[in-house]
């Protein structure tokens, strides 16, 4: 059934004690709003509408950075969830599909749960997502008669008997778009908060003879995030699930509890990820890749058989071909490392291309920034870059060429050539002893003066 998403993201989140809008606080490297958008994207929606409020410009920018087709509705005054959903009505005028209401601070609803909601919509006019709460607390309660949802009662308005119910409301609702907005149009605000509750549409729907039901999901999927402790728990929950997913799909994690994944990390089977590895967004490891301990990867691609680390950093734009080697205390940024090439020790390779089978010695730096612009370094196949070489871009080192250790390379090196670019060594017999004696005499004089 055609579906459009309405994602509520207008809340200030005062308990976060932050200038950042609540839905922009990150989980696994992405704002929680993006997690909600990704969850809804499983239904291939016709429209995705984000309802903004507090920090509207920042929320809109984050949403559009993830999906430039997203539509924005603005809730200038926060008058409750029903009022928030109503702001999306003009954008869905005449739309004949379903509308699904999600929340920007409830990021973990699964594709399977949303699919079950869509299936339930085939048989009911209104579908609500609920869960059995371990501690019902202040959640709204779902009053059921068999499979029929009679009404949702907010905690503030519930009597003791209703508060004893443990089947609780997640806030997620699905209905035909026209039906949803018709029901919202009849909402009132005669309640303890003086707000227009989205939850009241259930009772209105039942009074109109419409059918309503609630399906249940695991409580963990409905985790709402309103404070820093809850944000930390959400991060831990995400990491636990992601680690288990990796293990179950054939990834080796010797110490899974020490590895931190991003929301979009992709790892092939038989890859090995050692202890204390951190993934930022947009990383792909192919099958058989090996990331050694204490490495940090973001925005990069690591091919089959490549080895990274220990203590390596791959930054955005790093592309490692099969069997490439990036060793300890090496940083790679916006650089293509061809098959079998090696950068094993204490080097920085940025804005560069290294050819097949090339070996880069310890302490090598591509000097890619002149203070204003970035420049590219190209090293051909099977070249040998001597230790402590400075490659001052833009510069090209040819196939099977060499640079002498300690060289500062400012001119192109032809194929097969050896480049030596360093000062000539001059030895001065006895001068070291004379210098030491002179320095010691100065120190003695200084010490006597201080006394």
Image (cartoon, rainbow, N blue to C red):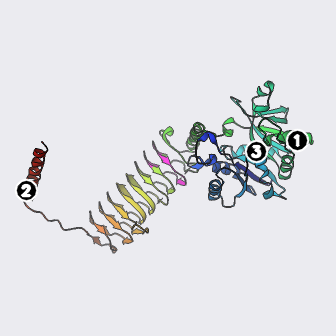
Out of 290 and 336, give the one closest to the viewer. 336
Q: Residue at x 80, y 38 (%)?
A: 214
Neighbours of disc 2 within 10 Å: few (<14), some (14-19), many (20+): few
Disc 3 is placed on an element classified as helix
Can the viewer see residue 277? Answer: yes
Whichever of callouts 3 and 2 sits on the residue coming sooner in the sequence is: 3
Residue 239 at what x, y percent from top left? 56, 41
Whichever of callouts 1 and 2 sits on the residue coming sooner in the sequence is: 1
Whichever of callouts 1 and 3 sits on the residue coming sooner in the sequence is: 3
Out of 358 and 184, give the one closest to the viewer. 184
* Label ID, residue 446: none
Give the vertical position of 424 relative to 217 (above or below): below
Instruction: Please check the rendered image and state whether residue 133 is part of the magenta-colored stretch, yes or no.
Output: no
Q: Report which residue position mark 3 lands on.
A: 81
Q: Report which residue position mark 2 lands on.
A: 434
The magenta region covers: 273-295
Disc 2 is placed on an element classified as helix
Q: Report which residue position mark 1 lands on.
A: 204
């Amino acid at each position: 059934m055609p579906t459009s998403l309405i994602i509520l993201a207008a809340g200030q989140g005062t308990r976060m004690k932050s200038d950042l809008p609540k839905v922009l606080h990150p989980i696994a490297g992405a704002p929680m709003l993006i997690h909600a958008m990704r969850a809804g994207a499983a239904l291939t929606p016709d429209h995705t509408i984000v309802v903004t409020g507090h920090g509207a410009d920042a929320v809109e920018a984050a949403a559009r950075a993830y999906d430039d087709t997203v539509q924005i509705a603005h809730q200038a005054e926060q008058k409750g969830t029903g009022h928030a959903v109503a702001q999306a009505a003009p954008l869905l005028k005449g739309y004949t599909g379903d509308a699904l209401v999600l929340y920007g601070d409830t990021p973990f609803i699964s594709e399977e749960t949303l699919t079950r909601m869509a299936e339930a919509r085939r048989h009911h006019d209104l579908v609500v997502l609920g869960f059995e709460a371990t501690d019902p607390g202040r959640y709204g309660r779902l009053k059921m008669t068999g499979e029929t949802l009679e009404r949702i009662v907010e905690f503030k308005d519930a009597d003791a008997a209703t508060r004893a119910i443990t089947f609780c409301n997640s806030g997620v609702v699905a209905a035909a778009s026209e039906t949803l907005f018709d029901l919202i149009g009849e909402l009132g605000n005669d309640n303890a908060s003086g707000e227009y509750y989205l939850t009241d549409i259930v009772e209105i729907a039942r009074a109109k003879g419409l059918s309503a039901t609630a399906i249940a999901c695991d409580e963990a999927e409905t985790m709402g995030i309103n404070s820093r402790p809850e944000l930390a728990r959400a991060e831990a929950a995400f990491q636990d699930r992601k680690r288990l997913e990796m293990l179950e799909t054939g990834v080796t994690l010797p110490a899974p509890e020490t590895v931190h994944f991003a929301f979009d990390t992709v790892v092939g089977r038989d890859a090995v990820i050692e202890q204390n590895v951190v993934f930022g967004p947009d990383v792909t490891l192919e099958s058989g890749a090996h990331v050694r301990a204490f490495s940090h990867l973001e925005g990069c691609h690591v091919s089959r058989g490549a080895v990274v680390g220990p203590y390596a950093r791959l930054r955005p734009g790093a592309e490692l071909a099969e069997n490439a080697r990036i060793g300890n205390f090496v940083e790679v940024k916006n650089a293509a490392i061809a098959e079998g090439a090696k950068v094993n020790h204490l080097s920085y390779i940025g804005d560069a291309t290294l050819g097949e089978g090339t070996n880069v010695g310890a302490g090598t730096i591509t000097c890619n920034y002149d203070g204003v612009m970035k420049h590219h370094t190209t090293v051909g196949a099977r070249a040998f870059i001597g230790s402590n070489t400075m490659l001052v871009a833009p510069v090209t080192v040819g196939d099977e060429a060499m640079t002498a250790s300690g060289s500062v390379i400012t001119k192109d090196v032809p194929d097969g050539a050896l480049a030596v670019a360093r000062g000539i060594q001059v030895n001065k017999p006895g001068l070291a002893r004379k210098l030491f004696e002179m320095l010691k005499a100065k120190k003695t004089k200084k010490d006597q003066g201080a006394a």
